[in-house]
Image: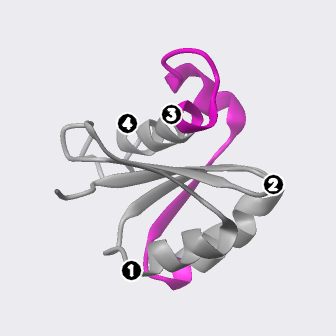
Amino acid sequence: MHIASIGIDLGKATFHLVGLGERNKILLRKKFSGSQLLAYTANLPASLIGLEACAGSHFLGTVLRQQGHEVRLIPAQFVKPYRKSNKNDFIDAEATNRFPLSHRHDGEA
Protein backbone atom coordinates (compact mmCIF):
# COMPACT_ATOMS: atom_id res chain seq x y z
CA MET A 1 0.00 0.00 0.00
CA HIS A 2 1.79 3.11 -1.26
CA ILE A 3 -0.07 6.39 -0.92
CA ALA A 4 0.71 8.67 -3.86
CA SER A 5 -1.19 11.73 -2.62
CA ILE A 6 -3.36 12.92 0.24
CA GLY A 7 -6.32 15.30 0.28
CA ILE A 8 -7.42 16.96 3.50
CA ASP A 9 -10.76 18.70 4.07
CA LEU A 10 -10.45 21.25 6.87
CA GLY A 11 -13.25 21.79 9.37
CA LYS A 12 -13.56 23.71 12.61
CA ALA A 13 -12.93 20.74 14.89
CA THR A 14 -12.35 17.76 12.58
CA PHE A 15 -10.22 17.05 9.54
CA HIS A 16 -11.08 14.43 6.91
CA LEU A 17 -8.17 12.77 5.12
CA VAL A 18 -8.32 10.69 1.92
CA GLY A 19 -5.23 8.96 0.53
CA LEU A 20 -5.04 7.83 -3.10
CA GLY A 21 -2.75 5.17 -4.50
CA GLU A 22 -0.81 5.37 -7.74
CA ARG A 23 -3.86 4.29 -9.79
CA ASN A 24 -6.17 6.87 -8.14
CA LYS A 25 -7.77 4.20 -5.94
CA ILE A 26 -8.76 5.24 -2.43
CA LEU A 27 -6.44 3.50 0.02
CA LEU A 28 -7.09 5.55 3.13
CA ARG A 29 -10.10 7.39 4.56
CA LYS A 30 -9.84 8.78 8.11
CA LYS A 31 -11.26 11.47 10.37
CA PHE A 32 -9.01 13.30 12.85
CA SER A 33 -8.92 16.12 15.36
CA GLY A 34 -6.22 18.76 14.76
CA SER A 35 -3.59 17.26 17.05
CA GLN A 36 -4.31 13.72 15.82
CA LEU A 37 -3.87 14.84 12.20
CA LEU A 38 -0.46 16.39 12.84
CA ALA A 39 0.71 13.30 14.74
CA TYR A 40 -0.50 11.03 11.93
CA THR A 41 1.07 13.04 9.10
CA ALA A 42 4.37 13.27 11.01
CA ASN A 43 4.62 9.47 10.76
CA LEU A 44 3.84 9.30 7.02
CA PRO A 45 6.56 9.29 4.36
CA ALA A 46 6.88 12.56 2.43
CA SER A 47 3.75 12.90 0.28
CA LEU A 48 1.92 15.30 -2.00
CA ILE A 49 -0.90 16.88 0.05
CA GLY A 50 -3.74 18.97 -1.35
CA LEU A 51 -5.63 21.44 0.84
CA GLU A 52 -8.58 23.64 -0.08
CA ALA A 53 -7.38 27.22 0.42
CA CYS A 54 -8.89 28.97 3.44
CA ALA A 55 -7.63 30.85 6.49
CA GLY A 56 -6.57 27.72 8.39
CA SER A 57 -4.95 26.00 5.42
CA HIS A 58 -1.97 28.36 5.36
CA PHE A 59 -0.99 27.47 8.93
CA LEU A 60 -1.57 23.75 8.36
CA GLY A 61 0.36 23.89 5.08
CA THR A 62 3.36 25.44 6.84
CA VAL A 63 3.36 22.71 9.50
CA LEU A 64 3.03 19.95 6.88
CA ARG A 65 5.92 21.44 4.86
CA GLN A 66 8.06 21.39 8.01
CA GLN A 67 7.26 17.67 8.26
CA GLY A 68 8.68 17.20 4.74
CA HIS A 69 5.48 17.00 2.69
CA GLU A 70 4.82 18.84 -0.58
CA VAL A 71 1.70 20.94 -0.01
CA ARG A 72 -0.55 22.50 -2.65
CA LEU A 73 -3.28 24.97 -1.69
CA ILE A 74 -6.20 24.87 -4.10
CA PRO A 75 -8.86 27.61 -4.41
CA ALA A 76 -12.38 26.32 -3.72
CA GLN A 77 -13.67 27.12 -7.21
CA PHE A 78 -11.11 24.71 -8.70
CA VAL A 79 -11.98 21.88 -6.29
CA LYS A 80 -15.70 21.89 -7.10
CA PRO A 81 -15.42 20.34 -10.61
CA TYR A 82 -13.56 17.32 -9.14
CA ARG A 83 -16.40 16.47 -6.73
CA LYS A 84 -18.06 13.25 -7.93
CA SER A 85 -21.40 13.49 -6.12
CA ASN A 86 -23.17 15.35 -3.34
CA LYS A 87 -21.08 17.40 -0.95
CA ASN A 88 -19.71 15.83 2.22
CA ASP A 89 -16.35 16.07 3.96
CA PHE A 90 -14.80 12.86 2.59
CA ILE A 91 -15.88 13.71 -0.98
CA ASP A 92 -14.37 17.20 -0.57
CA ALA A 93 -11.11 15.66 0.66
CA GLU A 94 -11.04 13.30 -2.33
CA ALA A 95 -11.70 16.17 -4.76
CA THR A 96 -8.94 18.21 -3.11
CA ASN A 97 -6.69 15.21 -3.62
CA ARG A 98 -7.50 14.70 -7.30
CA PHE A 99 -6.71 18.28 -8.36
CA PRO A 100 -2.95 18.16 -7.56
CA LEU A 101 -2.63 14.83 -9.36
CA SER A 102 -4.06 16.26 -12.57
CA HIS A 103 -2.03 19.50 -12.43
CA ARG A 104 1.59 18.50 -11.81
CA HIS A 105 4.18 21.14 -12.55
CA ASP A 106 6.94 18.73 -13.53
CA GLY A 107 5.14 17.37 -16.62
CA GLU A 108 4.33 13.94 -15.11
CA ALA A 109 0.53 14.06 -15.49
Which label was assigned to residue 102?
4
Q: Mark 1 points at which residue?
A: 43
Circle 4 SS class: helix
Amino acid type for the residue under numbered disc 3: Ala
Amino acid type for the residue under numbered disc 2: Lys
109 or 23: nearer the viewer? 23
Q: In the picture, which quadrant includes the C terminus? A: top left
* Cα–Cα gap, marks 4 and 2: 28 Å
Circle 1 SS class: loop
Amino acid type for the residue under numbered disc 1: Asn
How many other residues sit within 10 Å of disc 3, few (<14), some (14-19) or many (≥20)? many
How many other residues sit within 10 Å of disc 4, few (<14), some (14-19) or many (≥20)? few
Q: Nearer the viewer, mark 3 or mark 4?
A: 3
Q: Where is residue 46 in the image (x, y as percent from the top left)?
A: 35, 73
Q: Earlier in the sequence, mark 3 or mark 4?
A: 3
Q: Earlier in the sequence, mark 2 or mark 1?
A: 2
| Magenta region | 65-92
* Cα–Cα gap, marks 2 and 3: 19 Å
Q: Earlier in the sequence, mark 2 or mark 3?
A: 2
Q: Nearer the viewer, mark 2 or mark 3?
A: 2
Which label was assigned to residue 12?
2
Circle 3 SS class: helix
The residue at the point 43 percent across, 80 percent down is 68
Q: Position of residue 95 (x, y in %)?
A: 51, 33
